[in-house]
Image (spheres, grey):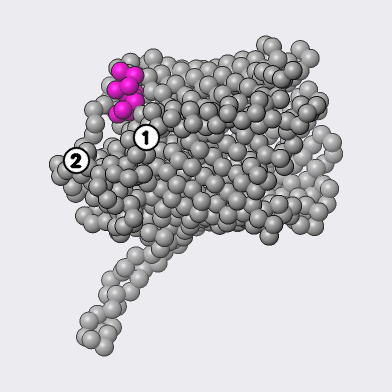
């Protein structure tokens, strides 16, 4: 979402009609019933209530024999200069600071007498949270978004996000897994974040069944963030509205040689929950309609004692009746030294079903890759790879002149294929305190020419408590559409990763970049992390 005041959008920038309507059972008077109650509790107050209920239930159980509390704090600082396009050649400074704080409380359920930990099959209960604070000290500030900006009064650019925070149970009663709170899910090629609940039931038939529901996490809400938000409606009234989400899945369970999951989810805009908002044209309330309707499938096998490992994943958009993403491949161990990996990819842009961008024709990218690796010994591994890319343009062409039975002229479809191709070579060298990777590549065809190479090294010293990193990489590019997009880049990187104390690390990386447009561009990145655990045992 763009910074500044609440953006607006003219009616011409959104689809004139919805693809479909919201489910009828989501209706009712505004803020009435369980959906209205949940809407009032959304954002940080709702999350606090959820955590209070979960923590109260945990404390109401018998005292835990050995509860573990783990915190991870990570501070990331970054500084560099950005050249503004134009004749003025103005430089803007970026001075960004990001703070992550993760807190986990584990083993809330009591362990058997005399045991430090509770067996996994007897059930586990834990609380897991992660928060992020972002701040920019440079000349190009990005203020907080919407409710978050109001909460923090972030005129100086601060933004606080709740990445995830939920009460999680595993094998409760021997058969139930659950999560309650803010959570995110990666289902093959599908991904989403929600404020709500998720439940999985295990069965003796080697199948697990899942159901989940809640509200989509958006950047405009308090403690929200835009990572999982679809393009196409950002910065609009629809982006600030409540969007319920429901779904279900079935997965293979406790099968050593198979991982498989088939899932469905739907997200929609519910008018009864958004009566307090005005549409972009000033109309009170927001129209209802399905925003996402996704079917996803993922599977991976491990056969022949792991020598053959095929895998596949897909995402099908039910709203557009289109296969948007596909990934399929396999790894074959020909011997202890020779390995072959093959991969086929298909990817296309995704937009909210309410976005006008769906009217345009976005052709997917088809990509195929083949990698062959050989271990020459205990120190050297070499590999070669090939890559092919195919873009297919399929659109109505001019009339053929042939007349149909009704007298009209049929229209032919013009199909063009735009291939790309390339390959590369790589080599790895490893000894106990030193590792090096060499890589070179070249790509041609559709898009132009790209070629480059890199050398990466890491050296461990001071009893393996200090790692020294070095890297040199360069590339050349030439666009086949615009002659102005031709040039080179050469970068020199150096840094270290030091273990100051057990669980306390400091990493610093500096880069000097030379390009066709920059005489020099220095960039500095630093990370400071603290990871500690406290475990208490009842006497």
Residue 157: x percent and y percent?
A: 35, 19
Which part of the image, by quadrant, shows the N terminus?
top left
Q: Dot 1: what SS?
A: loop
Marks 2 and 1, the one that precedes in the sequence: 1
Q: Residues within 10 Å of mark 1 (few under 14, many from 20)?
A: many
Q: Which mark is residue 42?
A: 1
Q: Is there any visible trace of residue 369 in the rendered image?
A: no
Q: Position of residue 450 (x, y in %)?
A: 52, 42
Residue closer to the observer: 172 or 23: 172
Instruction: From the viewer's side, name the closer residue of 182 and 94.
Output: 182
What's the magenta region?
140-153
> Which x, y percent locates residue 285?
20, 44
User: Dot 2, how many residues are within 10 Å of its Cα: few (below 14), some (14-19), or many (20+)?
Assistant: some
Residue at screen point 62% across, 34% down:
125
Q: Residue at x 37, y 16 (%)?
A: 138
Q: Is residue 379 left or right of residue 274?
A: right
Residue 278 disc label = 2
Does residue 208 belong to the magenta stretch?
no
Please identify the residue farthest to the bottom as the structure is shown.
405
Nearer to the camera, 302 or 374: 302
Q: Is residue 376 left or right of residue 518?
A: right
Q: Which mark is residue 425?
A: none
The residue sitting at 45% across, 47% down in the picture is 213
């Amino acid at each position: 979402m763009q910074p500044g005041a609440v953006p607006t959008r003219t009616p011409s920038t959104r689809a004139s009609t919805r693809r479909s309507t919201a489910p009828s059972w989501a209706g009712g008077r505004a803020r009435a019933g369980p959906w209205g109650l949940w809407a009032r509790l959304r954002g940080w107050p709702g999350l606090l209530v959820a955590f209070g209920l979960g923590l109260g239930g945990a404390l109401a159980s018998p005292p835990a024999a050995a509860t573990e509390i783990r915190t991870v704090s990570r501070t990331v600082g970054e500084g560099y200069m950005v050249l503004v396009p134009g004749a003025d050649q103005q430089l803007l400074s970026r001075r960004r600071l990001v703070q992550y704080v993760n807190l986990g409380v584990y083993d809330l359920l009591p362990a058997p007498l005399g045991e430090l930990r509770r067996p996994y099959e007897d059930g586990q209960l834990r609380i897991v949270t992660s928060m992020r604070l972002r701040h920019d000290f440079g000349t190009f500030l990005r203020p907080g978004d919407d409710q978050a900006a109001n909460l923090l009064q972030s005129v100086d650019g601060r933004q606080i996000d709740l990445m995830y925070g939920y009460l999680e149970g595993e094998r409760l009663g021997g058969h139930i897994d659950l999560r309650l709170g803010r959570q995110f899910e990666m289902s093959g090629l599908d991904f989403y974040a929600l404020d709500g609940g998720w439940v999985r039931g295990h069965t003796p038939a080697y199948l697990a069944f899942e159901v989940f529901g809640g509200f989509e996490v958006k950047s405009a809400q308090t403690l929200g963030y835009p990572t999982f938000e679809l393009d196409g409606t950002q910065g609009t009234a629809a982006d600030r509205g409540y969007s319920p989400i429901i779904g279900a899945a079935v997965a293979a369970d406790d099968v050593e040689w198979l991982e498989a999951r088939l899932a469905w989810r739907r997200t929609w805009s519910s008018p009864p929950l958004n009566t307090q908002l005005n549409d972009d044209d000033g109309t009170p309330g927001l129209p209802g309609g399905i925003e996402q309707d996704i079917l996803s499938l993922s599977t991976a096998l491990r056969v022949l004692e792991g020598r053959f490992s095929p895998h596949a994943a897909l995402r099908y958009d039910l709203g557009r009746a289109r296969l948007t993403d596909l990934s399929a491949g396999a790894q074959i161990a020909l011997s202890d030294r020779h390995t072959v990996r093959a991969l086929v990819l298909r990817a296309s842009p995704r937009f909210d079903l309410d976005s006008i961008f769906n009217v345009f024709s976005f052709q997917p990218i088809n990509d195929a890759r083949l990698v062959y690796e050989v271990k020459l010994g205990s120190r050297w591994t070499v590999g070669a790879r090939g890559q092919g890319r195919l873009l297919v343009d399929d659109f109505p062409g001019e009339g053929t002149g042939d007349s149909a039975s009704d007298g009209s002229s049929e229209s032919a479809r013009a199909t063009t294929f735009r291939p790309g191709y390339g390959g590369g070579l790589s080599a790895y060298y490893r000894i106990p305190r030193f590792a090096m990777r060499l890589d070179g590549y070249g790509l041609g065809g559709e898009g132009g020419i790209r070629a480059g190479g890199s050398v990466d090294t890491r050296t461990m010293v001071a009893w393996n408590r200090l790692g020294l990193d070095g890297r040199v990489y360069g590339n050349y590019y030439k666009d086949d559409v615009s002659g102005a997009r031709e040039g080179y880049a050469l970068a020199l990187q150096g840094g270290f990763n030091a273990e100051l104390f057990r669980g306390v690390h400091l990493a610093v990386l500096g880069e000097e970049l030379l390009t066709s447009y920059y005489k020099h561009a220095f960039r500095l990145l630093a990370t400071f992390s603290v990871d500690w655990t406290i475990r208490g045992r009842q006497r």
